[in-house]
Amino acid sequence: MELVTKSKTSVIDIGEAILDNAGHICKSLIKSGKVAVITDSNVAPLYAVRVCGSIKKAGLCPALFIIPAGEEYKNLNTVSEIYNFLAENLFTRSDLLLALGGGVTGDIAGFVSATYLRGINSVQVPTTLVAQVDSSVGGKCGVDLPAGKNLIGAFNQPDYVIIDTSLLKTLPDNIFNDGMAEVVKYGCIFDKDLFELLEANNPRDFITEIVKTCVGHKADVVKKDERDTGERMKLNFGHTVGHAIEKAGNYTSHTHGQAVAAGMVYEARIGEILGITPKGTSERITALIKRFGFETRLPCPAGEVLDAIKADKKILDGRLNLILLRDIGASVIHPITLRELKSVMVV
């Protein structure tokens, strides 16, 4: 699959047991030189030796950098450490950066790729479900500030995305299920058939097909709206409240999936209160995401969530573009002021 945007064409390869192609793919992007493999402390023991070995076999020189696992390390301090590592190892624009890991690693590495030497080519190798279906595709990257999530970032399309769905088989249920929040999101905003498939089946039995479906939806949206000024905003369903939950918990109390799951339910309820979303939609979403172990109530007072939303990077001219559902599989961008949002934010 190719994702063609104004800035770059990304190749997206989805399949089982394709991780060992990493070296060959890197070789197709740079004929010689170094590959910085950026990974985290959870993923490194599982796949770093394998990926670095593939790169060596292709005749390139891997350089491994391991960051601590966790959203709390998605910050400028980590970025600065990677910059120094690249500079000390004499990386140039003719070299390559490879992100091996989940969404946090991919976001950090993508931002480094966008900014080191004003741009160095990159490959994304997502190892978690949330990264495979969402964050590794589309070029959004960045880091957090104490004031809010992803407030520093860039649009930087990777040159290649290697999505090996066999890696998901080794994920423990809690990590796999955490990624299901993003899968459910795609069903809610674009794909009623996907939503109904999830209601009736174990997603592990169809995971490659599910990943391809989600990536296909995201690629279609990004082709039309790379810079997140129109249709791409719909991918934020559940994320306005979800990011606020993460911030209120200092990025340690709730995983991204937990926060987005609660955010989807809450935003569906807001849509019902506003008369945009059919009554009962939030209950249907609740029933599905509870199958994956998610809590659906706000974990903190609505006032704290609203305070966190005030720092949301998507606020323009005092208005927030909230994504609401017209039905399962159909979404709409709904501009709303913070005052109006406060009036419908009930527990």
Image (spheres, rainbow, N blue to C red):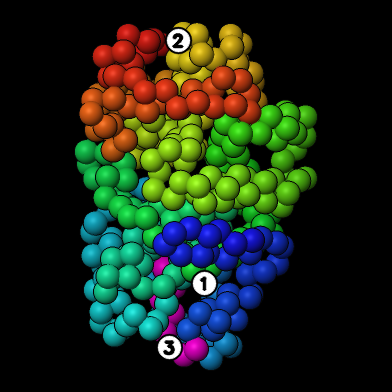
User: x and y percent of residue 211 in the render?
Assistant: 65, 49
> Badge 3: how crowded within 10 Å, few (<14), some, or many (20+)?
some
Prevailing SS of the magenta stretch: strand
> Which portion, as a residue range, is magenta?
31-40
**Does the CB distance between marks 1 and 3 fall below 8 Å?**
no
Instruction: In the rendered view, tell whether residue 331 sits above or below residue 4.
Output: above
User: x and y percent of residue 116 in the render?
Assistant: 28, 70
Q: Earlier in the sequence, mark 2 or mark 1?
A: 1
Instruction: For marks 2 and 1, give the one nearer the viewer.
Output: 2
Q: Amino acid at mark 3?
A: Gly
Task: For mark 3, give the secondary structure.
Answer: loop
Q: Amino acid at mark 1?
A: Ala
Q: Residue at x 60, y 81 (%)?
A: 24
Q: Amino acid at mark 2?
A: Leu
> Badge 2: how crowded within 10 Å, few (<14), some, or many (20+)?
few
Q: Which residue is mark 1?
A: 48
Q: Which mark is residue 94?
A: none
Instruction: In the rendered view, tell whether residue 243 sits above or below residue 67.
Output: above
Q: Which mark is residue 33?
A: 3
